[in-house]
Each structure stands twice: as structure tokens, then as C-alpha cells.
Image: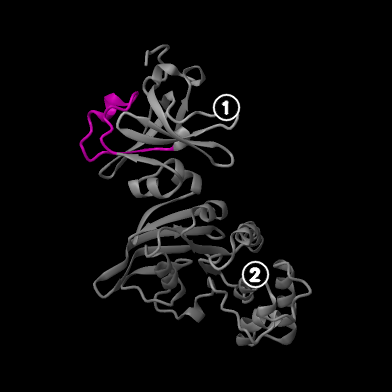
Amino acid sequence: MQIEVRNLTKQFGQFSAVENVNFEIQEGKLIGLLGPSGGGKTTILRMLAGLETPTCGDILFQGSKVNHLPPQERGIGFVFQNYALFKHMTVFDNIAFGLTVQKKSKREIHNRVLELIELIGLQGLHDRYPHQLSGGQRQRVAFARALAPSPQLLLLDEPFAAIDAKVRKELRTWLREMISRVGVTSIFVTHDQEEAVEVADEIMIINKGRLEQKGTPWQVYKEPQTPFVAGFLGESNLLSDTAQLVGFESVLQKRLAKTRVLIRPESIEVGREHEISNLAAATKGIVKSVQFRGTLWQVEVEVGEHRLIAHRSLEKETLLTGEKVAVLIHSLHLFQNDESLFLENELKRANTRAI
């Protein structure tokens, strides 16, 4: 199902939970609604489902407006974060519930439920009750129940929130594979960046009821369009008063005081002078802390009035707290009003430069 949202707004009294949101979702895509708690993600999901009525704006499925349609007529499957399984029903009966409401034949129900039990990998557990299942198994049953009536759109509200971290990671991979096999357009709400980046074809960053940016996880990470997106997705150094950053002076000195700069940790090279790839473009720094992060060293380094977080390979020698080092900022993102620029260090082509 292809989805289009036009000028979608939802107000609760004087509070705007969602304000003038516009987007399109192509058929078969798995979309992550990502943002801080209270940002409007779930309200958007509930309006798509028909559980909330928009204050204004339109929701279109396959080009047809569905604002007036009740939830049961929208062809939607909904998965809640707390499973919402019927405790008195077996796995089989929970999955069959929607088909029973549709008055499908016993043969159709039986075949469809067994097909879904195999899809979710719970063969042999059809006669168990929810309390006899693990959290991950209960969530798989919830997915199967939502898929049973063959919905055109699957909506998931924080689907992994009630599951422990290890199982949650396993379910992410399983969900992506399952959605790919089924081919149903899907939208899931999360505030977990790692979850959204790992699972979604595209993500939409929602903040204070507004859509900040939409794109693939890589596009949004590499080309943030607003300071909020830059600071929210991934690790970053957000700075102001940056006119003296070495290699960027000619651009930054022309900017107004409201300029904000984002520097990703992986864009900062920090080390002893002989380790720096282009010493001509580097400046001096002092190591303030070094922390092991599993796959790399996270180094906090003081450069002038700024403290920057940088990444350093485990293959290199450990830096010491208080050690004087060279710091090379390869690139940064600059934000001013509605303008977003990506800048590379102007001095990287120089052959030599004393620091």
C-alpha cells in the first residue's frame, strides 16, 4: 500500500501534538518513526490507524482519502508494545482471532494460522497460552495475529519495548526478514536509534510534532538538515563560536553568531604527530580522557576552548590522559537558519604546516 500524508495536524486543546506533517511512503517499505518521547510519533501512527481523528490534513491510501474510514475498514494490522494477547486463548486462537471476526471458514483459518506459525518459527507451540511463552515468543505471536487478516499496512508501536536487550536484538533481524518475505508496507515507532537504523529502509525524524527529516538511515546520518537531527542521530560534537577551527576559518569567520557546527567523532583524527595523515591541516590538543568502546577508543580532547569526542582505532597505541596530541578535523556540518552545509578542511591539500 502506498501512503501519503498532507498537512497532517493534531491538537489536544491548545497543545499541538502533530503540526503540518507531510510525507509519502512507497509500497512495501519498512519505515521507522524515530524521535524523543512525546514528539508525536505515536499520535501519527494512531491517526494512520484511525484511532485518532486529525484536527486537519488528509491521509491517503493508494491515492484515496481515508480520514472518514473507521479502523476496521482501513486494512491495517496493529502491533502494540505490550503484546495485547488474549490470556485465555492459545497461540492458535490468538492468531486466528481476526480471521474469526471476518467469518472465514474453518479450513481457511486453519491453513492461514499454520502458515503464520511456521513463518514466526513457533511450530509445535500452537496449543500454549501466553503465560507459557517467553517475551520474544509472545511478540512473535502478536506479529502473526496482526498479519493474519493479510493487512495492506502494518503499524508497530514500540514493538520491542517490553523485551530484554538480547532478545530485542534478535527480533530486529527477524522482523526485517519477515517483513521482506511478506512484502507488506510497515511503519514502526521507536526512540531507539540503533533499532531504527538497523531495521528500517527509511527513517523519519519526528520532534515536537514536526517532521525534521526523512531518508535512508545513511542519508540522514551523513546529511543532517537540522541541528536537531544532527545531534539526535548518532554521536556528535555540536559547537557554536567556531570561527577559529583550523582549516575552516575562511568560511566560518563570514558566518553570523547563530551559526552551529556539527562534527562527527569519526571525522576527527587524533594522535601523535607521526600518526596524523595530514599534519598540515591539524592543530594542537590535549587528551582529557580515553575510554574503551568495544570496537574503538573514544578520546575526549581539548582543542582551544572546545572539548571534542573523537574515535581512534584499537590497532593504535593507547593515548594517555594529559598527553599533547595533534587533532585533524576532516569535515563538519554547518547550520545557519534553514541552511545546511557540508565543509571539508581547506588545509588538507597543504604539504606542511607547523603546529
Give the image's coloring scheme. Answer: one colour
Residue range in magenta is: 240-264
In the drawing, what numbered circle is on residue 140? 2
- What's the residue at 49%, 49% (across, down)? 216
Q: Is residue 154 magenta?
A: no
**How far from the left and from the top, in percent, is residue 241?**
25, 35
Q: Amino acid at mark 1?
A: Lys
Q: Residues within 10 Å of mark 2 (few under 14, many from 20)?
A: many
Q: Amino acid at mark 2?
A: Arg
In the drawing, what numbered circle is on residue 316? 1
Characterize the magenta stretch by its predominant secondary structure: loop
Q: Secondary structure at mark 2?
A: helix
- In this orientation, which residue lies closer to the viewer: 241 or 337? 241
> Looking at the image, which residue sits at the far right?
124
The answer to whether 251 is drawn above or below residue 336 in the figure is: above
**Left or right of 148: which side holds 192?**
left
**Left or right of 284: which side holds 160?**
right
**How far from the left and from the top, in percent, is residue 49?**
46, 73
- What's the residue at 42%, 28% (across, down)? 322
- What's the residue at 39%, 44% (across, down)? 224
Q: Secondary structure at mark 1?
A: loop
The answer to whether 297 is drawn above or below residue 247 in the figure is: below
Is residue 294 among the parts visible in the rendering? Answer: yes
**Left or right of 28: which side holds 264?**
left
The answer to whether 342 is drawn above or below residue 205 in the figure is: above
Q: Residues within 10 Å of mark 1 (few under 14, many from 20)?
A: few
